[in-house]
């Protein structure tokens, strides 16, 4: 990326300081309390993925990293691996995307997608529209609880 290596090392060293967005813990806690298993699919390494998930402070049933899947998202393999490990068909799952490029990946495996777009990204051309495109997680909880 043309950035000095020391910046990557600094990010790696401070990864344990990451905090989820303000409404993430509350929303995911309520979903988990309703008996809905949570999973994470991330382009992180195993180590950084586990650190990030640990920062949630929640019981996450499945964590699929790009390192473990052998592919980065939006390749279908990470999404499929999560579905396999959750033992759920795509139509009975809701993927919460944080990246516009997840829309391409989830579409290839038939995963309904809620796009949590805090910064106002533009979707890549040719990808199906998500079920929802929101700047916060506030509308997520009723959507999940009404499906469950």
Image (tube, helix red, strand yellow):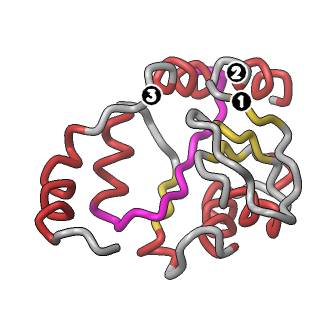
Q: Which quadrant, please, contains the C terminus?
A: top right
State the residue position of label 2: 141
Provide the residue span drawn in magenta. 33-47
Left of 104 or right of it: where is 147? Answer: right
Compared with 6, 54 (above or below) is above
- Indicate whether residue 70 is drawn in magenta: no
State the residue position of label 3: 21
Left of 140 or right of it: where is 118? Answer: left
Q: How crowded is the residue under tag 3: few (<14 C-alpha within 10 Å), some, or many (20+)?
A: few
Of all residues, the one furthest to the front in this rendering is 2
Give the percent coordinates (x, y) of residue 48. 30, 58
The quarter of the picture where residue 81 lies is bottom right
Q: How crowded is the residue under tag 1: few (<14 C-alpha within 10 Å), some, or many (20+)?
A: some
Label 3: which secondary element: loop
**Which mark, by number, is residue 134?**
1
Taking the spot 80% from the left edge, 55% from the top edge, the residue there is 111
């Amino acid at each position: 990326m043309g950035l000095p290596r020391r910046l990557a090392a600094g990010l790696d060293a401070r990864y344990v300081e990451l905090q989820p967005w303000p409404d993430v813990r509350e929303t995911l806690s309520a979903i988990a309390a309703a008996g809905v298993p949570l999973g994470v699919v991330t382009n992180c390494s195993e180590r950084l993925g586990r650190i990030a998930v640990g920062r949630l402070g929640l019981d996450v049933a499945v964590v699929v990293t790009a390192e473990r899947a052998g592919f980065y998202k939006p390749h279908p393999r990470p999404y499929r691996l999560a579905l396999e490990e959750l033992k759920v068909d795509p139509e009975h799952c809701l993927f919460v995307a944080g990246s516009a490029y997840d829309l391409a990946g989830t579409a290839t495996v038939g995963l309904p997608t809620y796009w949590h777009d805090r910064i106002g990204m533009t979707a890549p051309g040719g990808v199906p529209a998500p079920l929802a495109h929101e700047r916060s997680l506030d509308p997520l909880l009723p959507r999940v609880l009404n499906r469950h």
